[in-house]
Amino acid sequence: MRKRNTFRYKLVLFLVFAGPAAFCFLMVMIVPFFYGIYLTFTSWDGISAVKEFVNIENYSAVFADSQFWRSLLLTAVYSLISVVLVNILAFVLAYLVTGKVKGQNFFRAGFFTPNLIGGLVLGYIWQFVFSRALVCVGTELDIGVLSTSWLSDPYKAVAALIIVSVWQYSGFMMLIYIAGLTSVPKDLIEAGVIDGCNKWQVLKNVILPQMRSSFVICIFLSITRCFMTYDLNLSLTEGGPYGATQMAAMYVYQQAFVSKDYGAGQAEAVILFAICAVVSVIQVYIGRKNEEVLQ
Amino acid sequence: MNKWKRIGSFGLACTMVTMLLAGCSGGKEEKEKTEEESVTISLLNTKSELVDQFEQLAKTYKEATGITIDVQFTNDVVSTHLSEKYASGSPYTIMMVDRTDVYAFQDYLLDLSDQKWIEDGGAEYGVNIDGKTYSFPLLVEAVGLLYNAQAIEETTGEEFNWEDYNTPEKFEALLKELSEKGMEKPVAVNKDDWSLANHYFGQLYDQQGNAEETSQAFVDSLKSGEMKLGENTRFQSLMDSFDMLLEYNINSADPLAADYDMNNEYFANGDVAFWFNGSWVTDVYDKTEKIGIMPLPQSDASDEANDYLIAGASKTFVIDKEYSTEEQQEAAKDFLNWLVYEEEGQQFMVDDCGIIPAFGNITKEVSAPISVSAQQFIKEGKTQYWYQAIPGDHGTEVGAAIQKYMSGNIDREELAAEVENYWKGQE
């Protein structure tokens, strides 16, 4: 019998099972991440072979770039509204389709489908809806709000982005809420009913507190997704009208690849990452803490 | 039993690891293998209207020479796409780029000065840096106002000759007449930033003395902040004409909701008579062939602005020397020669793509009416220098400013200020 607690044995075992995955993770996540951080200290234009070291010049330029902060603010507003709406809608949908509705599976599949369509395609479909279909309906029926394209007005274009993201993500979040709802112990609900709770009170006092972890996951997922939105932004509004709906991820891309200022673009990406990480960590921390209090 | 299970699972794990590693290195082996058999070169096409033609070309070329061309297409900003490709170390052998990209990517490009076609127009229309030619001019294009003569004649009942309407007064009178006689909005204006900023607004840089040096000097004065656009007659003249186009714009209810394909359709159908665009427009001949191109009528007629058409070599082929093998580079050079000197190559350029070739040895006449119309100007020497050394973000930045102007969010002065600011930021 071979010894199983030597270091060598454990190492081999690790390499055989976790090695390939660890290798891939290292190569496609960790190495590019640190290489990216290195690039923020250079004035690389994305093309030339020389990468000149410029210290923290890129960061100071980014902090002085008002347009970047504007796009970040827009992203924050967009994310906040989207996250709230996505989660409310997703929960309501989940609650409805787990109740005694006929054709539950059909509705579940239907609400989930938008999530299977890629963001780009989705954007182009909705672009048609907003700039042609709705305009057509609006002019025929003489509805003022719809008679001009939403995508040509800076505020309505943001609204359009939010509508499409809510439509896209709520189906996915709904699945998580369904899982959460079905795992609420039946005896607790029954106990509540026996104690004289009506439906609303059961929901508020029994179901919702039991589903805290679902909320933590869903809010986390929707925050990170919304903050990093690029595909939808590109295909639905292309940052337009006149750059008014250019969100952070898109601005970073523009800076790095179109304005050919790779170092600054990368520095913005790092800042975006930091903000996103901090927001997510705080959110998960608070969520978890409340969970502990409850238990 | 237990022992076998262990050996079995270990074996399985090993196989998976090997497969994974094989997956990582597989690409390279495969590449070497095909190279032994025959050379494969890749080609990047960046003109959306020529996608089908290039697919067909790859087949023709394979039959003629046995060399496989892997044709790829992108709709991205070319320099953006290429910097991504170079960053990942996988550019194309032959790349169709804009002229400014040649300067940006110069370090990676093959010097083509020793090629035969240099003599036949390559040096004149290609991009020369320090006396070396790095690019193969694929075509000559023109920017201007497209007109649908059939639609105009049907509405007014008079024969249309663009020279009769080459001042803003006469032109506006025609627009008014068209509008009164049933064609309510006779103009289509794009909202696409490349069209607005690089082509329409680009006329400001083009019509500055009809020479590369004078255009460059004008742009330099913008960069240094000396030039005040508000006092510039060309700027005012262009914006006056722009206002006129916007007044008769078919999309005037919501100018930023304009759609390029819809504009194309309006123009082809004769719903509008004029469309500011260029000679690359190809799919508008369903209804009529009486379509041509003319200079935009402006109040400032200096530099023959109302008579000379802006034309120049735009898209150009370059060959990568960093990541392509010797064989691929040779094959790429052979391909360019084939385009210029073989019957099939010329046929591809002139007949299939309907482009105006930059090479003097090609005697084939273009057949597409807009190209014929543009070629007329070129033959008579009535062409205006086309300034194409515009930075990559000119489209998005200046385009956004013009879009704001179109939708009435800023006035002409504010537009001038935004453009001035943009150029000052370019050092």
Image (tube, coloured by chain):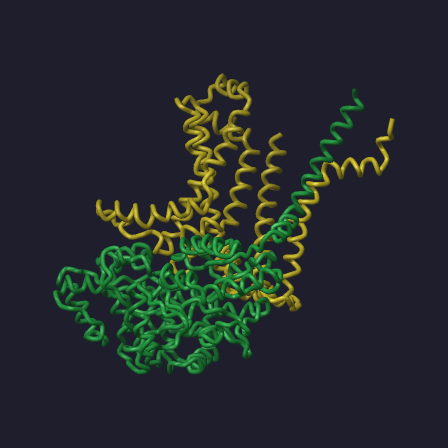
Chain colours: A yellow, B green
Left/right of residue A97 with respect to residue A276 in the rendered view: left
Q: Residue furthest top?
A: A194
Count of numbered labels shown in the rendering: 0
Q: Dividing the image into 4 quarters, which one contains the N terminus of chain A?
A: top right
Q: Left or right: A73 with respect to B175?
A: right
Q: Is residue B306 left or right of residue A234?
A: left
Residue B296 lies, in percent from the top left, at 28, 72
Residue A73 appears in the picture as rendered: no
Residue A235 seen in the figure = yes
Q: Is residue A200 above or below residue B234?
A: above
Residue B269 in which image quadrant: bottom left
Residue B387 drawn at (x, y percent): 42, 74
Give me the residue at 53% from left, 38% from top: A218
Query: Where is A18 relative to B407, above or below?
Result: above
Left or right: B409 in relation to A193: left
In the image, A106 versus B387, the foreground residue is B387
Res B249 quadrant in image: bottom left
The percent coordinates of residue B415 (x first, y second) are: 37, 70
Q: Position of residue B202 (x, y in %)?
A: 38, 72
Quadrant for the C terminus of chain A in the image: top right
**Residue drawn at the location 30% of the way across and 54% of the way down:** B262
Residue in the foreground of this view, choosing between B370 and A149: B370
Q: Residue at x 75, y 37 (%)?
A: A16
Between residue B139 and residue B114, name the one nearer to us.
B114
Seen from the viewer's position, the closer of residues A207 and A40 is A40
